[in-house]
Image (cartoon, helix red, strand yellow):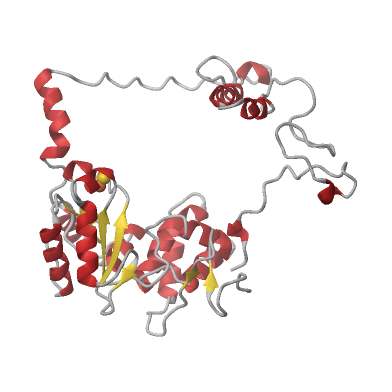
Amino acid sequence: MSALPGSTEGTAVTGLDSSPVEPVAADLPPLTEQTRLECRELMARYPQARSALLPMLHLVQSVQGYVSPEGVALCAEELGLTKAEVGAVATFYTMYKRSPTGRHIVSVCTNTLCNVLGGQRIFEAVKADLGVGHDQTTADGSITLEHAECLAACDYAPVVTVDYEFYDQQDVESTRELVAALRRGEKPLPTRGAPLTDFRGVSRQLAGFSQHADAEAARAAVDGPSAGVPTLVGVRLAEERGEAAPPMQAPAPAPTPDVDEPRAATRPTGRTGQAPEKEASDARVAAAGNPAERAGAKTADPDRKGPSRRRTGTRATGTDTPATPAQSGSGEGPAPSTSPSPPTAQREV
Ligand code: FES
């Protein structure tokens, strides 16, 4: 295993960029045989084992508080993937943390609607109180603060979540009180949803495991308020006006393939009656913003006459940049590769 250029010695690097992932701290709980067995339990829930990667990442995060290099290695080993492949997934989603997280994660929405109603002011106030910025954790390990993109609760803006549970219609003072209570070890009830747990607890839930002793306890825990008045305004207005969405049409039964029929006769068609690839190609051409893009899009037309769309010769076609004399040596050298550069996610970690 080698570190990328520029990364410090011994610092693991995963995923699409070279931001360092902190190594496992000495006092972190280890990933045990139990964690491995639970990973396998998750894998068994899917027809394709690798589909379990997302919950497995939540699982390792529930043990160590972040997706550590050790957690990446465990997932890779169990799924038969490279650590780079696992890292590419773990670094794509913001819910997977790359450094140890505090007991609670406080997310302040600073997206459009929350922002105009004070989201940024809330974030700045909490940031000043805690003395930490975005994606940073207080020295006592109680709180990780982050600003968040839309939390899908615009009808309750400005919104703050703690461990992904909603605290609706916040303002600076209510959020400061909320965070102070969390630091005292209290767990104020969220406005909606389940009672508060902590970051590792909710990570375990997201992995698909219950924290509760039995089904009844689990049901009681999530039996909180869900949809509220602002969410249901549209439904109420529709009822008052006697409006309703048209009933959904049952999907047409799939045609039974006729074994004697030529393949072409059963070829699937798109909405316009053409083959889906043709429709997609036409749409790309129509969406092209300039002649060069249009020309490039036309090269992918499945009905296009002429040379094969897959370049097999030595000359570049379409809108590709031709090889420079310096690259080719003769000015007529090999065309640029038609394959994209290997994604940086394939870096060795
Ligand atoms: S903008 Fe904040 S929840 Fe949508």
Which residue appears at 57% of the width and 21% of the height?
279
What residue is drawn where x is 77% and y is 40%?
A: 322
In which quadrant of the rendered image does the C terminus lie? bottom right
- Left or right relative to 64: residue 169: left
Residue 318 versus residue 323 in the image, above or below: above
Q: Position of residue 107 (x, y in %)?
A: 27, 59
Name the outermost residue toward the right. 330
Residue 196's place in the image compared with 324, above or below, is below
Residue 291: x and y, percent? 63, 25
Camera-side residue: 332 or 256?
A: 332
Is residue 260 visible in the rendered image? The answer is no
Tell me the quarter of the picture where residue 215 sits. Answer: bottom left
Residue 98 in which image quadrant: bottom left
Residue 314: give x, y in percent of width and height.
Answer: 85, 39
Quarter of the figure that contains the N terminus: bottom right
Residue that appears at 44% across and 75% down = 33
- Residue pictured at 31% horizontal, 54% vertical: 148
